[in-house]
Image (spheres, rainbow, N blue to C red):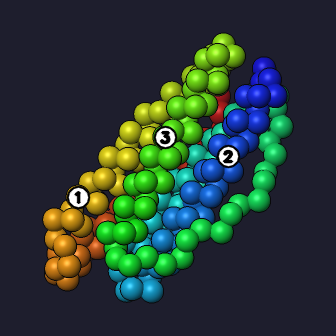
Amino acid sequence: MLNQKVQDAINNQINAELFSSYLYLSMSHFFESMNLSGMAHWMKIQAEEEKIHAEKFMNFVNDAGGRVVLAAIDAPQIDWETPLAVFEDALGHERKITGMINELVDIAQTDKNHATNSLLQWFVDEQVEEEASADNIVQKLKLVGDNGTGILMIDNELGTRPMPAPAAPAE
């Protein structure tokens, strides 16, 4: 069901999703070092979501008769100037991932691979949510600026984010 071009593109996306998880873990531990446990919690959950996304792609490749090929994961950034800088980087990263998903959609449509295209529509919708969530936090952090009380209020709010459900096997 998967030709080599589609399989390679999905394997590249798997690597990108795993890097995303690694990046968000780095961001989480950066926030831990700043005693911003709510922001750290938010990023840990984001890291879990990205791992779930990778698993969803891996399950699909396996179910479609392809072969998952894992590649090395680059080291993520470890330091930022401010909480705002972290979330601006997270937003920029989500926009990059959106572009990659859109390229995958183009490949699947050119290949007339309807099963892959169907899977990718979930990711298209997910990326709208991912960007909106990060942008919402960026806008709040811009609003409070360097106000410590405002940052702590946002930190407290982000600490209430619930854990995502585990990835279900592709159907």
In the figure, 82 relative to 124: above or below? below
Alpha-carbon distance for marks 1 and 3? 20 Å
In the figure, 81 relative to 162: above or below? below
Q: Residue at x 59, y 68 (%)?
A: 76
- Write down the residue under mark 3: 98
Q: Residue at x 61, y 51 (%)?
A: 17
Alpha-carbon distance for marks 2 and 1? 30 Å
- Residue kind at label 2, given as amino acid type: Ile
- Write down the residue under mark 1: 139
Question: Position of 23 compared to 92: left or right?
Answer: right
Q: Residue at x 47, y 73 (%)?
A: 28
Q: Quadrant of residue 80?
A: bottom left
Q: Nearer the viewer, residue 18 or 92?
A: 92
Marked residue nearer the N-terminal end (1 or 3): 3
- Residue kind at label 1, given as amino acid type: Gln
**Mark 1: secondary structure:** helix
Query: Residue 133 location in percent, x, y?
Result: 33, 51
Question: Position of 5 compared to 17: left or right?
Answer: right
- Write down the residue under mark 2: 14
What is the quadrant of the C terminus in the image?
top right
What is the quadrant of the N terminus in the image?
top right
Marked residue nearer the N-terminal end (3 or 2): 2
Q: Quadrant of residue 120?
A: top right
Q: Nearer the viewer, residue 10 or 166?
A: 10
